Image (cartoon, helix red, strand yellow):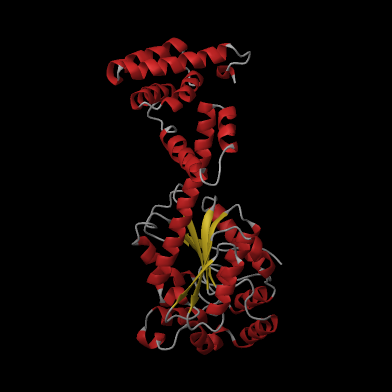
Amino acid sequence: MTVPRLLGSFAPGAAPATTNPLLVLLPSLGTTSTLWDGVVAALRADSRTAGLRILRVDLPGHGATPAAAEPFTIGDLAEGVLAVVDEAGGGSFHVAGVSLGGAAALELAVTHPDRVLSLVLSCSGARIGTPDGWAERAASVRASGTASLVTGSAARWFAPGFLERDAGGSGARALAALVDIDDESYACCTEALAGFDRTADLGALATPTLAISGEHDTVTTPASMEDLADDIPGGRHVALDGASHLAVLEEPASAAELIAEHLDAVERVDAASVARERGMRVRRAVLGDAHVDRAIASTTPETAAFQDFATRTAWGDIWARPGLSRRERSIATLASLTTGGHATEIAMHVRAALRNGLARNEIAEVLLHTALYAGLPASNEALAIMRDVFAQQDATTTPETND
């Protein structure tokens, strides 16, 4: 077994800047990356996904990828996809695959969870078909070529009446492309599927997963896709009416809408995680580990959402902005708290101001200046709180300013 050399290309429509999220699209057995044409066009028209880098990768002996020189496994195929991604800039990515492409996508999520941001499985599975069935398919192709598969594939791939309605369109082009697939590469793909089974790994999969099925698919049925989604923590399944095994080709607008919605949700969660991590770093730097640890320890189920909100928004967004220094933000915060009469927060932010580089006399000057605009009583109370904080620090042998 060996890792096959795969080729991919960026779909046009957006500059392939490495700062943009990457979506990798994998086709099904017997099809090329053009399978995704309709979906790509719809994603480009959607404001949520218009800026995606979309990388389409062809299977061995399919489309642009050269014929397979040796047998390979689905694991090898996944490594081949990862090599293309690394050549294109690397990093983490979203991945969507149809049938065999979905098997490779699932393999990536299982073996490289640190790289795969989200997973879309269209008409696929953790195990597809039977070893005997795939062995028969391989023998048939080696004997008669992929042209012998056109009639059977038409029946499996498309819902009743689709080819007639789509006369000369994407369905006909997909069948024409099947004839050009390298026979031995096709046979190797079927043998790779014969040995693929990741059903035991689904329960531990932490990758956000969307499963799409076609109403008329008899290969990877809606029921099997629903079971697949149920076995993956947080997995979601949607069946597309009027579609069969190549649901993304038959219903590209619906498939694209589901994918855009899925990626948008994942990106929002990821952005929240980044803000949360950044906010916790800033919060600890400004308030000190001891204060933050006490706040976290006292969190209850009722206050957890507020703690998360404050960490992401106050500390991960506003306090992390580059427009003002932390010293300047402390001045603004002390003035605002005094003006608003928020006495319970003033002591905490007097200590924070010291950590942010303000001297004691500067803090007093801020509160004196605030008296001019917020009123004498408000600043008098703030100055009393300031005095208590200084006294507490003077009474300790390890002042918080030296933490």
- Coordinates of residue 142 in the picture (x, y in percent): 64, 84
Count of picture labels:
0
Q: Position of residue 211 (x, y in %)?
A: 52, 69
Residue shown at the point (63%, 64%) measured from the top left: 107
Residue placed furthest toward the right: 1
Q: Is residue 133 above or below residue 92?
A: below
Q: Which residue does the image show at 30% across and 18% down from the upper left?
A: 375
Q: Is residue 76 visible?
A: no
Q: Position of residue 319 (x, y in %)?
A: 43, 32
Along the line of sight, which residue is nearer the eye, 393 or 333? 393
Residue extending farthest to the left is 373
Quarter containing the N terminus: bottom right
Q: Quadrant of residue 72?
A: bottom right
Above or below, comparing residue 207 to residue 362 in the picture: below
Q: Nearer the viewer, residue 381 or 240?
A: 381
Identify the image quadrant of the C terminus.
top right
| Residue 102 appears anywhere in the view | yes
Image coordinates of residue 102 in percent, x first then y, are 56, 69
| 75 relative to 9 in the view: left or right | right
Occupied quadrant, residue 362: top left
Q: Would you identify the image quadrant in which residue 13 lies?
A: bottom left
- Point 53% across, 75% down: residue: 123
Left or right position of 364 against 81: left
Q: Nearer the viewer, residue 375 or 209?
A: 375
Kindly identify the residue that appears in the image at 46 percent across and 12 percent down.
Answer: 360
Q: Is residue 126 above or below residue 234?
A: below
